[in-house]
């Protein structure tokens, strides 16, 4: 909850600053699709050890992005992406979920009418969740999730006019070790295996408002 409040405060403060510096801000909304590089090998081994399907690692994420820019080359962006996939064995099935939310500030290194190159630094929350089908499995790991906040330095490239293509990519610098939760009772799991979110990339089709 504190992380979401922090993100909301950052969003409100940044938009006020941009509005004060430039009353002709260009806003752009984009449909995004992308993926993240991460390592959850310890959790995958644990799940398979108790007879459940391995979590899916190749889930296409999709979502929305909102971007603004002002005359002083200041850029602000907000992105939300989600994804899910199902895996099965002969005796069980499970679903893997992914969620990420990113708020970032940037500076336009190159700014043209049809092209932007922006250096960005953001605050990103990643969620990785695994849920076994309850009617097929009653073991010790039916519904768990892992959350980790991170800094997200990266680059954003935009090409086009009112309709434009966007690419944002970067690495993830963790702000904590993250934590596992038992989603059935909201209790923290203190001995869960590590999950390492390493980087991200997303492509989008944007429309200037």
Image (tube, rainbow, N blue to C red):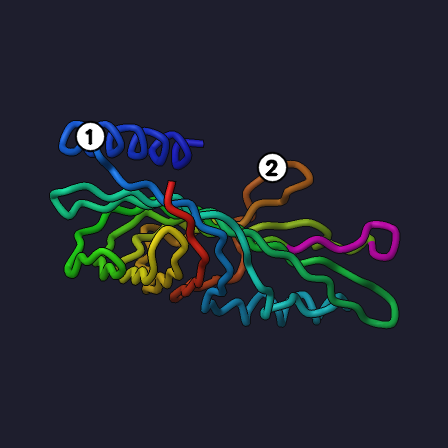
Is residue 151 placed above or below 168 in the rendered structure?
Answer: above
Residue at image x 24%, y 52%? 121
Residue that mark 2 sits on = 186
Residue at image x 32%, y 62%? 159
Q: In this rendering, does residue 179 appear at all?
A: no
Q: Tell me where residue 181 sits by quadrant.
A: top right
Residue at image x 60%, y 65%? 59
Marks 2/1: CA–CA distance: 44 Å
Which corner quadrant holds the N terminus?
top left
Viewer-side residue, 177 vs 16: 16
Query: Would you call the spot at circle 1 few (<14 residues within 10 Å), some (14-19), or many (20 or more)?
Result: few
Residue that mark 1 sits on = 23
Q: Which residues are magenta?
A: 130-137
Is residue 188 placed above or below 170 in the rendered structure?
Answer: above
Query: Would you call the spot at circle 2 few (<14 residues within 10 Å), some (14-19), or many (20 or more)?
Result: few
Look at the image and say whether residue 193 sits in the magenta stretch: no
Residue at image x 71%, y 58%? 95
Label 1's element? loop
Q: In the rendering, at what x and y percent does residue 63 appear? A: 52, 50
Q: In this rendering, does residue 135 appear at all?
A: yes
Q: What type of secondary structure mainly makes up the magenta span?
A: loop
Label 2's element? loop
Viewer-side residue, 155 vs 161: 161
């Amino acid at each position: 909850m504190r992380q979401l409040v922090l993100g909301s405060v950052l969003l409100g403060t940044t938009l006020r600053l941009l509005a004060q510096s430039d009353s002709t801000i260009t806003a752009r909304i984009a449909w995004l699709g992308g993926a993240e590089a991460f390592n959850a090998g310890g959790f995958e081994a644990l799940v398979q050890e108790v007879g459940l399907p391995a979590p899916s690692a190749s889930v296409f994420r999709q979502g929305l992005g909102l971007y603004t820019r002002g005359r002083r080359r200041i850029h602000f962006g907000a992105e939300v992406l989600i994804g899910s996939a199902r895996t099965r064995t002969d005796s069980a099935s499970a679903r893997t979920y992914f969620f990420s939310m990113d708020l970032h500030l940037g500076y336009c290194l190159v700014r043209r009418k049809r092209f932007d190159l922006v250096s960005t630094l953001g605050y990103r929350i990643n969620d990785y969740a695994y849920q076994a089908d309850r009617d097929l499995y009653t073991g010790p790991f039916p519904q768990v999730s892992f959350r980790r906040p991170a800094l997200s330095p990266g680059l954003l490239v935009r090409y086009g006019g009112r309709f434009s293509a966007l690419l944002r990519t970067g690495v993830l610098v963790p702000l904590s070790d993250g934590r596992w939760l038992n989603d059935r009772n909201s209790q923290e799991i203190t001995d869960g295996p590590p999950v390492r979110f390493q980087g991200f990339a997303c492509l989008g089709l944007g429309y200037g408002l």
